[in-house]
Every structure is written in C-alpha cells, then in structure tokens.
Amino acid sequence: MFLLLAGAGGFIGAVLRYTISGWINKKTASPFPWATFTVNMTGSFLLGTVSGLDVAEAWMTLIGTGIMGGLTTFSTFKLEGLHLHKNREKKTLAVYTIMSYTVGITLYITGYAFPMLFS
C-alpha cells in the first residue's frame, strides 16, 4: 500500500515539476536556474508544512515522500551547478548554492511552524 502511495505521489510531483519548470524556463532567460530553485524551495516549504501537521504515515508517504520527492530535485540542482561551473558562472554558482541551502532550510523551518499559527 505504501509503495503505491509513494509511486502515485511521485508521479504527481514529477508532473508538477515538469509543468512548473517548463513555465518558468519560458519566462526567464538567466544563467540562474530559477526553475529548479523555485520547485526546490516550494517543496522545502510544503514538506515542512506537512511535517508540522504531524499527519498519519500514509499521508506522509503520499505527500512527503511521493509528491515532494517527485517535485523537488537534488540531482538537477547538482547538474545545474556543474553546468554553471563549466560555463565559468562562478558568482551565479555561489549564489545558487548558498541560496538553495539557506533558503531551503529556512523555508522548511517556516513551513514546519506554519500549522502552529492556526492551532
């Protein structure tokens, strides 16, 4: 059952990432990888929120492991970092890396605290 929940959620998350990334890539012409940054930051906040809700294991599997796992992408983050390095975009690489980690962790913590505002 949990395998199916993770798989269904992963499908939904991957479709969302593909759709959101495609839309952002059409709107931006920057060496900064805004599409991946946006989906990763959105996923950080949403995963924090789901974690802060203390939902049942089945919901965490569907949403946390599945949807957020399919939406966010650590491998593409690394690949884009490598491309920035190869293209000698060292300042962009530094900003992208620092922002991804610091903003991502901050958004996770913010998302985790978010449900407490309403309880």
Image (cartoon, rainbow, N blue to C red):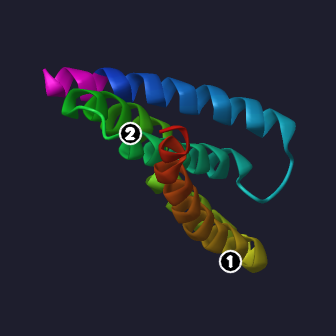
Taking the image as drawn, is residue 62 in sight?
yes
Q: Residues within 10 Å of mark 1 (few under 14, many from 20)?
A: some
**In the rendered image, is residue 86 in sight?**
no
Residue 86 numbered mark, or none: none
Q: Please, is residue 40 above or below residue 63 in the view? A: below
Looking at the rendered image, the disc whose residue lies closer to the viewer, 1 or 2, is: 2
Question: Which secondary structure dominates the residues rendered in magenta?
Answer: helix
Q: Amino acid at mark 2?
A: Leu
Query: Marks 2 and 1: in contact by CB < 8 Å?
Result: no
Q: State yes or no: residue 46 in magenta.
A: no
Q: Residue at x 50, y 55 (%)?
A: 108
Between 41 and 25, the residue placed more toward the observer is: 41
Q: Is residue 6 part of the magenta span, yes or no?
A: yes
On the image, the x and y values in percent for residue 84 come to 68, 68
Please, which residue is most extreme toward the left here? 1
Q: Which residue is mark 2?
A: 53
Q: Secondary structure at mark 1?
A: helix
Residue at mark 1 to residue at mark 2: CA–CA distance:
33 Å
Q: Which residue is mark 1?
A: 94
Q: Residue 90 in the image: x percent, y percent?
A: 73, 79
Q: Which residues are magenta?
A: 1-7
Horizontal placement of 31 versus 49: left or right?
right
Q: Earlier in the sequence, mark 1 or mark 2?
A: 2
Q: Quadrant of residue 55?
A: top left
Quadrant in which residue 104 is drawn: bottom right
Q: How many marks?
A: 2
Report the side of 38 relative to 44 (left or right): right
Residue displayed at 20% across by 21% down: 4
Q: Is residue 94 above or below residue 57?
A: below
Horizontal and vertical percent position of residue 94: 68, 77
Q: Is residue 22 left or right of residue 71?
A: right
